Image: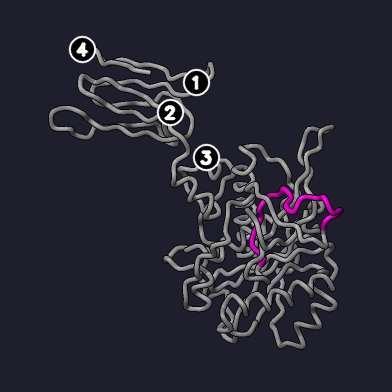
Amino acid sequence: MCIRDREQGGCSGRFHKDGRTVLELQLVGDVLKVSEGEPARVKCRGAGDDDTQSRCQSEPGLQLSAQAVLLHEHTVLFEEVSEPLWMQKHALDGHPYDKRCPYCVQARLKARRAVRKLRESYLSPAGVSISVDFTGPHEVGVAGGVQGLVGCDIDSGWGYVGLQPTRRDSDTLDSLLDLQVQLRRDSGGKADAIAQLHHDDDKSFRGKVEAYARSQGWLDTNTGGYNPNANAVCERRIGMLTFGFRTALLYATGGVLYYPQLWDVGLKYGNYMLNRQPWLGGESPIQRLSGFAPETDDRLHVFGAYCLFHVPKQNRAGKFRPTAEMGVWVGVDESSPTGHLVVPIEWDSEQQCWILHEVVVATTIT
């Protein structure tokens, strides 16, 4: 579309795509104003004798859905732009909150720290203070999870996600033992021993969990009933993970929340990225724990990306089955230096949808 400024009071125009108006602009003098539009971006530049920069204004919260170049005599040309490189990098980084990303805005992902009060008021001088809480129940995920146990170190912001079939104390204890292993691994063995465990007043943390905490010498504290404000650090962590997974799923499905059964691997993927992304102050939680910035893992891909994964010979159904199957990438296997977490997919011609199978570990993908 092209609109040309006239001598009396400027002019306006609409940018159409597929029979609908996606952008309505008004040109007043050398100022380009937005009346309505949808999220994207704009570029404006002056092309007169001095090649000066033109001014471009938009309403709060709106960005332009075209690339605009302001030429001499106030002629404005629009070109549709493809997904920018920063958006691809942003998706590869796991969608840390960016107001330019429509998926982040739609999912209401926020980038505030979990701890809002003075950190010192939450800490135990004897060692690491861990806050834990549950998210769920959810429908059975592709990794078999129904309940998610979320834990975080109050001081560093480091977090953990464990998947459980139930909230029984035995399942909760297994998750806490795994939390200890991951804390030691991510810190390079430099983290202090756990000194305090804070949680809701829930039966899941009694019995075997209570006995184990006593045997380890942990200070076992609870919220004194259901009081989310008394466990705000972990509640905020759950909110960050939920918003992060929702954003990644929106991006992977093109803006529609298909396949919620990916929630369990999605929360673990989001936790993996949160532990490695810089927070306020420029350090990641793992860097605060270990003193060293984590290296970028070259196995990382965009969550939900289509891939082909190699199927070992012993796992093939027959001699003439292909050596690779279709799947979607959902994370890295931290127990293996070359492992990828992949969800096999299969097209159902009757229901006209993709069927998701249980997550598998693949060493070769393309």
Residue at the image point whose x is 52% and y is 55% from the top: 93
- State the colouring used for the structure image: one colour
**What range is drawn magenta here?**
316-333
Front one among 312 and 42: 312
User: Which amino acid, by three-letter code, is at mark 3?
Assistant: Pro
Q: Which residue is mark 3?
A: 102
Among numbered discs 4 and 1, the one appearing first in the sequence = 4
Query: How far apart are the alpha carbons under marks 4 and 2?
Result: 28 Å
Quadrant of the rendered structure where residue 216 is?
A: bottom right
**Disc 3 to disc 4: CB gap under 8 Å:** no
Bin the neighbour count of mark 3 within 10 Å (Cα to Cα): few under 14, some 14-19, many 20 and up. some
The image position of residue 120, as x and y in percent, is 52, 76
Earlier residue among tags 2 and 1: 1
- Say what secondary structure mark 4 lies in: loop
For mark 1, give the secondary structure: strand
Q: CA distance from mark 3 to mark 4?
A: 37 Å
Disc 2 designates what residue?
80
Q: In the rendered image, is residue 229 in sight? A: no
